Amino acid sequence: MGFVFVSGDLALDLAGTLKWRRSDPEELLVTPADLARWTVEAGVLSDEPPVDAAGLRRTRALREVVYRLVRHGMDGLPWPEDDLRELNRAAAGPTPRMALTTSGLSRTGDIAAVAAEVARAAIALLAGLDRLRVRECGHPDCTRVYIDRSRAGNRQWCGMEECGNRVKAANYRSRKARSVSA
């Protein structure tokens, strides 16, 4: 299973690891190893950190806090105090350590450092102007949220490869079926 990073923000990319929330939820962080792999693919750490079941549970809980806060912001609702406390608690954790090595940048840390990095990204997003550009994918079942940085501000899909092409292909098949039956 591959992760996609189409949201334009680390915190939103973590939120996207639970797909299809309204219809048939698909969990992408099934095992601690999945989370360890995500940390490297997301660029948070250079090497996979040790992750146990508790770290996976905490990260999934943080993911849901981020998603709720973003959705409340999109819907013009006040942020839940419990979620704000949890986000700020995670953000107060250690940060990944950076070092310049002969092979380039090295980012090291544990799963608490990953959570802190995600929480800080969420805080920066929710407190900044990009919060006004957060959109939900136009695919009827997709619940992935992203920052619309398109020039016209009219991006419809979380990503063309997954949702955009699916919707366009379905529309094409529907048009073809109508023309054949006409």
Image (spheres, grey):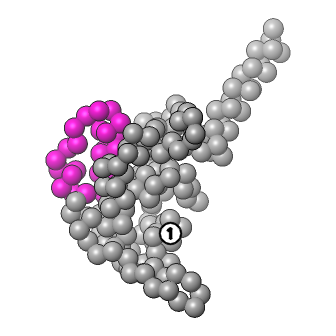
**Residue 170 position in % (x across, y down):** 68, 29
Quarter of the picture holding the C terminus: top right
Q: Would residue 104 be visible to someone looking at this image?
A: yes
Q: Horizontally, is 56 left or right of 103 in the view?
A: left
**Prevalent SS, magenta region:** helix
Q: Horizontally, is 169 left or right of 109 in the view?
A: right
Residue at horizontal 32 percent and vertical 60 percent from the top: 119
Quarter of the picture holding the N terminus: bottom right
**Residue 111 position in % (x across, y down):** 35, 73
Q: Quadrant of residue 69?
A: top left
Local crowd size for mark 1, using a 10 Å CA cut-off: few (<14), some (14–19), many (≥20): few
Q: Amino acid at mark 1?
A: Gly
Q: How many numbered circles does the render carry?
A: 1
Residue at horizontal 39 percent and vertical 39 percent from the top: 132
Q: Does the stretch in magenta take in 76?
A: yes
| Nearest to the observer: residue 161 or residue 74 | 74
Q: Would residue 156 be visible to someone looking at this image?
A: no
Q: Does the stretch in magenta take in 22?
A: no
Q: In the picture shown, does residue 179 fall above or below 8?
A: above
Q: Horizontally, is 137 left or right of 62 in the view?
A: right
**Residue 145 position in % (x across, y down):** 45, 43
- Check disc 1 and report the residue beneath it: 43
| Nearest to the observer: residue 3 or residue 28 | 3
Secondary structure under the numbered disc 1 in the rendered image? loop
Outermost residue on the top side: it is 182
Residue at horizontal 17 percent and vertical 50 percent from the top: 82
Residue at horizontal 53 percent and vertical 89 percent from the top: 101
Q: Quadrant of residue 176?
A: top right
Magenta segment: 62-87
